[in-house]
Amino acid sequence: MRHALISWSIACSMLVFVPALSSGQYAYQAVFPALTGDALANEVRAAFTPETVIPYAFARDTLFLKIDAINRNLSCIYTGHTLPIPEGQDPTQAVFLNGANDGINTEHTYPQGFGLADTKAESDMHNLFPSRVKTNNDRGNRPFGESPDASTTRWYLLNTELTNVPSSMIDKYSELGSAGQFEPREEVKGDIARAMMYTYTIYRDLVAPANPDFFPMQKDILCQWHEQDPVDEKEWNRTWKIASYQSGKANPFVLDCSLASRIYCGNVSTSCRLLDVQQTTTSSGLVYQSATSTLILPEGSRALWVYDLMGRLLYNETNGNSCKELRWQAPNVTSILIARVQMEDGKWELTRFFPGR
């Protein structure tokens, strides 16, 4: 499975995001890069816990219609089973189909019954996904894990279920194991792992007392899945869409691929380390110096625009002080920023960077 670094292009004076494929993991935003272990987990909890979330009923409607639906078509995270959301109907009720097996319900990857029910955490969309009703019920509160083909009792794809090993497209199936484990299809294993790590980290005070062994027993396999199925453009966009409803707080395990290793997994992949270095230096001539929170502009800069991730203009100048001094002092914010520079010869320079905290 190939995943995307982000390259950028300018068209019609608008910012356009274009994925460039890469075989490795990537970190868009370094999250407390000097910390590890419990000290890091505590800082992540303090920085990324949303102050507000939407009430649960509204969160489900928002998730279905505004976060996960594509052209009003909603797909199950585990099986890919897809249903349309008709115009003018309540999104959650429309696809639930009165609880029929092939309806779509709301899945808490970290089970709702393990400390999340009737709390703010119940509504946190970073832990929620649409799921086919029957598959959702079969998963229940079961832990995630690898299920050997020979001992898998049920296979799920779209709205079909098999009790024998599939003859083709085996990686597209989610599986229920005879030992009680549930294995998601290959292409979403990393998404599931990062949702689980997020919930356990942010809401540990709720979930650990409710079932102290649930996350630790899965930790090693979740680490493997995080490494095997890196963040892609879809997951990156999803976490920021959710953040716009939750105090601007993204899932930090999506933002920084080394975070899982530094808290839970005990190692940082080479690709993560390399990309952490790459994120402050670009081939375009724009360089961000993290030590001084300064964006260094190339010679011949005529105009500068700086946007946040939502495309909102934060700063603009033409032949101003920053262009003359070839440096711009970045604000102390925690989200990715995008800088665009027009050169004297009419050419463009573009980069993304991550201001210091």
Image (cartoon, rainbow, N blue to C red):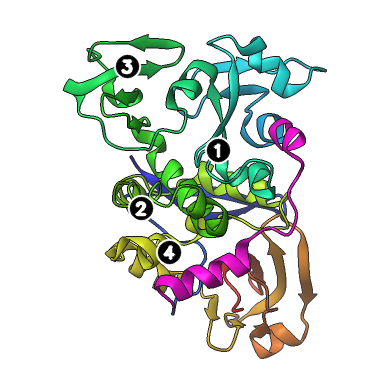
Q: Earlier in the sequence, mark 3 or mark 1?
A: 1
Residue at (25%, 15%) from the top-left corner? Answer: 168
Three-letter amino acid code at the position of disc 2:
Pro
Q: Nearer the viewer, residue 259 or 215?
A: 215
**Nearer to us: label 3 or label 1:** 1
Q: Quadrant of residue 164?
A: top left
At label 4, counting other C-alpha atoms closer than 10 Å, the crowd grade (few under 14, some 14-19, many 20 or more) is many
Q: Are marks 3 and 2 in contact (CB under 8 Å)?
A: no
Label 4: state its secondary structure: helix
At label 2, counting other C-alpha atoms closer than 10 Å, the crowd grade (few under 14, some 14-19, many 20 or more) is some
Residue at (70%, 23%) from the top-left corner? Answer: 92
Compared to residue 332, the image places residue 95 above or below, namely: above
Cα gap from disc 2 to disc 1, whole angstroms:
17 Å
Three-letter amino acid code at the position of disc 1:
Gly
Q: Is residue 348 magenta?
A: no
Residue at (67%, 90%) from the top-left corner? Answer: 325
Three-letter amino acid code at the position of disc 3:
Arg
Q: Is residue 202 left or right of residue 146?
A: right
Residue at (44%, 80%) from the top-left corner? Answer: 34
Residue 10 appears in view? yes
- The residue pinned by badge 2 equals 216
Q: Position of residue 83 (x, y in %)?
A: 60, 15
Residue 6 appears in view? no
Q: Position of residue 25 (x, y in %)?
A: 37, 55
Q: Which region is colored magenta?
A: 35-61
Three-letter amino acid code at the position of disc 4:
Leu
- The residue pinned by badge 4 equals 259
Q: Earlier in the sequence, mark 4 or mark 1?
A: 1
- The residue pinned by badge 1 equals 113
Q: Position of residue 93 (x, y in %)?
A: 72, 18
- The residue pinned by badge 3 equals 154
